[in-house]
């Protein structure tokens, strides 16, 4: 009976030893690097965010309104009409008194060219108003562009500060992790030498696991925030 208990105890210690090594490796490889991350300067994120789809939409709208204004300023050309007529063949010639003369046998070229001016009164009196209204549309597009860009910059600032805060929290948690790991390793040694009970050893293990969970939560929070920041700012942050 004692041998069975001893085997179970040895198996438990071996399992705890392996799990502890895996946890420590996870902290060192997958979490510690997050506490050393450095975000790009805010001005870089702002500049790259100017190429996001929501901002590009209003940039295109502004360009469209500008081209419409240029077309409106040239619209006076539509008032002028130039026409022409060309005919080749044999034609009867009408005299001044209205009598029809004998047509000539030789074919001849006949052509007529002219120009006309037709200005609709509503266009004439509202031309300045149309130009002014189009300028107002450009100003509206500019305002919408600046508003959309400003909202994106505010979101970037919010995510940026959240990431910085989580990195600082993770640094503190890693200090707690180092202390908890030291206490756990000492308790494991004491337990192997029968200096402490299994309950005391289990308590140290629980404290150690709790700190690991906190570090992992911070790590995933930082990762989520940075991925959002990458999408929003169109900037690669993770290497």
Image (cartoon, grey):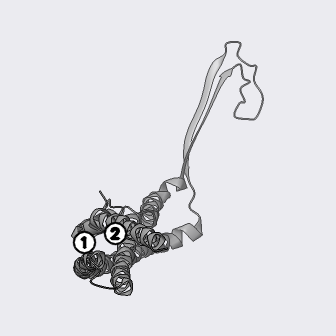
- Observer able to see residue 212: yes
Whether residue 55 is situated above or below residue 161 in the rendered picture: above
Whether residue 149 is situated above or below residue 92 in the rendered picture: below
C-alpha separation, residue under disc 2 versus residue under disc 1: 21 Å
Q: Nearer the viewer, mark 2 or mark 1?
A: 2
Give me the residue at 75% from left, 23% from top: 101
Are the residues tagged 2 and 1 within 8 Å (C-beta)? no
Between 62 and 118, the residue placed more toward the observer is: 62
Whether residue 137 is situated above or below residue 53 in the rendered picture: below
Give me the residue at 29% from left, 62% from top: 29
Mark number displayed over residue 35? 1
* SS label for mark 1: helix
* SS label for mark 2: helix
- Observer able to see residue 233: no
Give me the residue at 70% from left, 16% from top: 104
Q: Position of residue 159 (x, y in %)?
A: 35, 77
Residue linked to disc 2: 20
Between 114 and 219, the residue placed more toward the observer is: 219
Q: Is residue 114 left or right of residue 58?
A: right
């Amino acid at each position: 009976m004692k041998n069975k208990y001893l085997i179970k105890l040895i198996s438990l210690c071996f399992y705890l030893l392996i799990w502890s090594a895996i946890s420590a490796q996870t902290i060192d490889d997958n979490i510690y690097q997050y506490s050393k991350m450095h975000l790009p300067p805010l001005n870089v994120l702002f500049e790259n965010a100017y190429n996001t789809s929501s901002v590009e939409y209003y940039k295109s709208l502004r360009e469209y309104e500008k081209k419409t204004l240029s077309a409106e300023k040239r619209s006076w050309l539509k008032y002028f009409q130039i026409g022409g007529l060309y005919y080749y063949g044999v034609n009867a010639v009408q005299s001044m008194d209205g009598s029809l003369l004998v047509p000539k046998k030789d074919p001849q070229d006949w052509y007529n060219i002219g120009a006309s001016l037709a200005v609709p009164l509503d266009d004439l009196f509202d031309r300045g108003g149309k130009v002014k209204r189009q300028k107002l549309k450009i100003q509206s597009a500019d305002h919408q562009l600046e508003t959309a860009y400003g909202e994106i910059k505010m979101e970037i600032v919010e995510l940026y500060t959240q990431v910085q805060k989580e990195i600082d929290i993770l640094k503190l948690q890693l200090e707690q992790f180092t202390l908890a790991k030291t206490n756990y390793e000492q308790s494991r040694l004491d337990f192997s030498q029968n200096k402490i009970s299994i309950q005391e050893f289990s308590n140290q293990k629980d404290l150690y696991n709790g700190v690991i969970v906190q570090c992992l939560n911070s790590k995933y929070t930082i990762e989520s925030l940075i991925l959002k920041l990458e999408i929003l700012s169109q900037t690669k942050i993770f290497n």
